[in-house]
């Protein structure tokens, strides 16, 4: 087992102390990669992938929670279907208590439905995935694409390189959201980021013009809605 921790620039004294504590208690278990400056999520993840010692890599975000059986269940799927490149799960979104989810983010199960879904929305939930290091690197690894590092990578893997994927149809990951979760997904700046990214997908042939209208224009419109309406759209149509 190998834990790779990428410190994307200087951390707080408190965070450094936590990392040092666990590193001292578990000699040789952690690879700690300290970057001198903050380069963003994409470059940090790219370095982490390159440094990983093993073929199967599980990732998660620092402030979320994996179910105790998450990795065990994902490994079991790889053992049953070794041709797969990525295995993910649903996400349960919570504010205070992981046992009190406010929404479940669901995604398609099989590779063919994941492929179709990917043309409009990301069909793999980034913090939940376990993937093959070679599949990620052969697809170009992570790029610097603010807010869309995951979708950018998975679109290349699935739509261009035909990666085989599977999503376990239950939440094995608990993502912490704040009270301003929907507010942060709004505004004209966010809408422009959406349109720029999905215009790029259209130019690459990853989506059709109809897909762009539904996905790109549709999401941009949601971005500029009042926060209450935007939350309604998310909860009614994008979550369960």
Image (cartoon, rainbow, N blue to C red):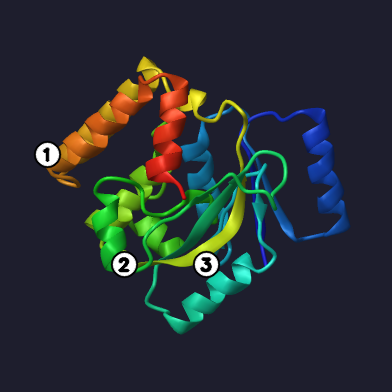
Pinpoint residue 30: horizontal percent, then vertical percent: 72, 55
Which residue is painted at 57% across and 51% down in the image?
A: 92
Q: Does dot 3 land on a helix, a strand or a loop?
A: strand
Q: Which residue is mark 1?
A: 209
Mark 3 touches mark 1? (CB < 8 Å): no
Pinpoint residue 202: horizontal percent, then vertical percent: 17, 39
Q: Is residue 40 visible?
A: yes
Question: Which label was assigned to residue 84?
Answer: none
Q: Which residue is mark 2?
A: 111
* Quadrant of the rendered image containing residue 2: bottom right
Q: CA distance from mark 3 to mark 1?
A: 36 Å
* Quadrant of the rendered image containing residue 223: top left
From this viewpoint, which residue is outermost toward the top? 188
Pinpoint residue 120: horizontal percent, then vertical percent: 26, 45
Q: Nearer the viewer, mark 3 or mark 1?
A: 1
Q: Does dot 2 land on a helix, a strand or a loop?
A: helix
């Amino acid at each position: 087992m190998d834990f790779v921790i990428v410190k994307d620039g200087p951390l707080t004294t408190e965070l450094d102390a936590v990392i040092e504590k666990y590193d001292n208690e578990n000699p040789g278990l952690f690879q700690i990669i300290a970057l001198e400056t903050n380069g963003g999520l994409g470059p940090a993840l790219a370095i982490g992938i390159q440094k990983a010692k093993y073929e199967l890599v599980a990732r998660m975000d620092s402030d979320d929670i994996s179910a105790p059986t998450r990795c065990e269940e994902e490994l079991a799927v790889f053992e049953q279907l070794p041709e797969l490149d990525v295995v993910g799960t649903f996400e349960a979104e919570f504010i205070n208590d992981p046992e009190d989810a406010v929404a479940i983010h669901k995604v398609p199960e099989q590779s063919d439905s994941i492929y179709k879904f990917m043309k409009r929305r990301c069909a793999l939930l980034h913090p939940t995935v376990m993937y093959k290091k070679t599949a990620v690197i052969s697809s170009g690894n992570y790029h610097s694409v603010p807010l869309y590092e995951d979708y950018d990578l998975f679109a290349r893997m699935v739509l261009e390189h035909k990666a085989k994927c599977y999503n376990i149809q239950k939440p094995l990951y608990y993502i912490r959201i704040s009270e301003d979760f929907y507010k942060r997904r709004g505004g004209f700046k966010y809408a422009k980021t959406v349109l720029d990214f999905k215009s790029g997908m259209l130019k690459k042939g990853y989506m059709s013009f109809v897909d762009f209208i539904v996905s790109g224009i549709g999401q941009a419109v949601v971005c500029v809605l009042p926060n209450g309406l935007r939350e309604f759209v998310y909860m009614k149509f994008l979550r369960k």
